[in-house]
Image (cartoon, grey):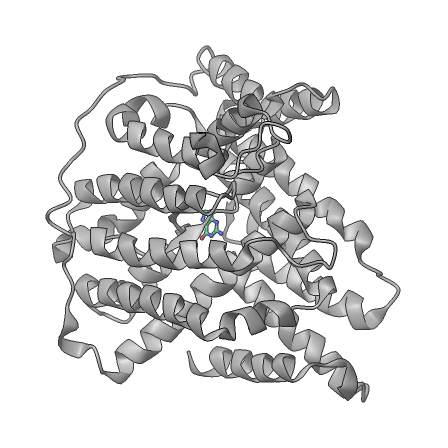
Amino acid sequence: MIASLFGFDSKQHRLQTEILAGLTTFLTMVYVLAVIPSLFKPLATQGMDNPAIFTVTALTSALGTFIMALAKRPFAQAPGIGCASFFVFTVCLSLGYDWRFALTGVLVEGIIFILISLTGIRQKIVEAIPRVLRQAISVGIGFFIAFLGLKNAGIVVPSDATLICLGDITHGQALLAIIGIIIMEVLLMKNVTGGILISIIITTIIGIPMGVTHIHDFFCTPPSIAPIAMHFDFSKLMSVDMIILVFTLLFMDLFDTLGTLVGVCENAGMVNKDGSIPKLETMLTADAVATTLGACLGSSTTTTFVESASGVGAGGRTGVTSLFVSICFLLSLFLSPFFLSIPSAATAPVLVIVGYMMMKTMVHIDLNDKFNAFPAFITIIVMPLTFSISNGILMGFISYVSIRVIYGKYREISPMMYVLAVIFILKFILL
Ligand SMILES: Nc1nc2[nH]cnc2c(=O)[nH]1
């Protein structure tokens, strides 16, 4: 009865699979509870209380993912790492704006995101994305999350000479992550139910004698969100700076979310016969509502997490998966020391393996047709290398339109694609 509220149908779905999928997604993304507060640390000197960010991140993730559960889809939401970095390092530290100004920008962006769904503009944007770009988005996200996993595990590390290079894989967390990748791949090849989750648990346990897993405490009381919740600054609401900030946030949020939803659904075969994504509009609205409510709690932009692909990969198909993720985030408010003791070496393999699964969509792209292969290549390469899903989509759109214009194939491009390509070029030049 309750399960049907979240799109669960006992004839088509298995409760056990949905719950395992929820747990898998949660375990692959619980690291945000550690990463987001650490990203915001530099703003503590400007009065943005850091312990409160932990509670805000957990609450926003629980609330946003619950809204997605009501939309009956297996996706989880949380404050995005990309958007949080932009909030802290670009808006506050580079451009010098106060965090309250930035938070107001997130609120306004969320409200505009909700409003454009009422006008139907968003639907037109979604329909304008050609099939090849959707497939390329799926592949690009695959590389993006695999890169995220390799980085989290310390297998790929920064290098002054070459930007990135191979880390020390002979011991510690990088070695543990490689063991985790092997365990996970073997379990998946043998079609073991809950293979992803089982391998996270086994890898965490192996990490104890290796000195990578440290379990200190289990419980803690969450810090208050009062120092940052509802701390808006509306004094510069109509300024040019605010308009630019809101549009940048809107672009990042819309295309990050769109890319994640389209990429994951396309990869998991969650598409209608005509190629459209079921409930895409509802999911985008859920994302917009979550961003708006998250801003009220004191969070940077809430986005649909690419890590949801791990739960979808584990068989999650309904809102019960997201409901379970949401419950886990609520519990994590009190159990954070326990969840945070699961090392990233144990969850990073999920990102790598799911990235590998998503990469397989590549076989559907006709690489002998340059008009499709080139924009697909641009979309795929830009996502991991600029660490941004939205950059990949924008560059992919621009190259799709320009290669056709260069070869005189004007009629193959819809008016909406022309409009979007011009807006995207302006975005790169002006914002
Ligand atoms: N879609 C998406 N997923 C993420 N997972 C971690 N950070 C992000 C992000 O910024 N966007």
Judging depth in this view, the residue of 402 and 175 nearest the camera is 402
Identity of the residue drawn at 54% across and 29% down: 18
Please determine whether, in this image, residue 95 is positioned above or below residue 48.
below
Q: Quadrant of the N terminus?
A: top left
Give residue 261's position: percent from left, percent from top: 56, 53
Residue 341's image quarter?
A: top left
Give residue 121's position: percent from left, percent from top: 50, 75
| Residue extending farthest front | 1
Please determine whether, in this image, residue 264 is positioned above or below residue 353.
below
Give residue 235's position: percent from left, percent from top: 13, 76
Residue 407's image quarter?
A: bottom right
Judging depth in this view, the residue of 99 and 278 nearest the camera is 278
- Can residue 162 be seen here? The reply is no
Give residue 350's position: percent from left, percent from top: 57, 32
Identity of the residue drawn at 33% across and 39% down: 62
Identity of the residue drawn at 53% across and 19% down: 203
- Can residue 41 be seen here? The reply is yes
Q: Is residue 143 left or right of residue 345?
A: right
Q: In this view, does 193 lie to the left or right of 325?
A: right
Identity of the residue drawn at 71% across and 58% down: 275
Please determine whether, in this image, residue 351 is positioned above or below residue 98.
above
| Residue extending farthest right | 368
Q: Is residue 56 left or right of residue 164?
A: left
Q: Quadrant of the C terminus?
A: bottom left
| Residue extending farthest top | 209
Judging depth in this view, the residue of 285 and 385 nearest the camera is 285
Please determine whether, in this image, residue 281 is positioned above or below residue 28.
below
Q: Count numbered badges in the picture.
A: 0
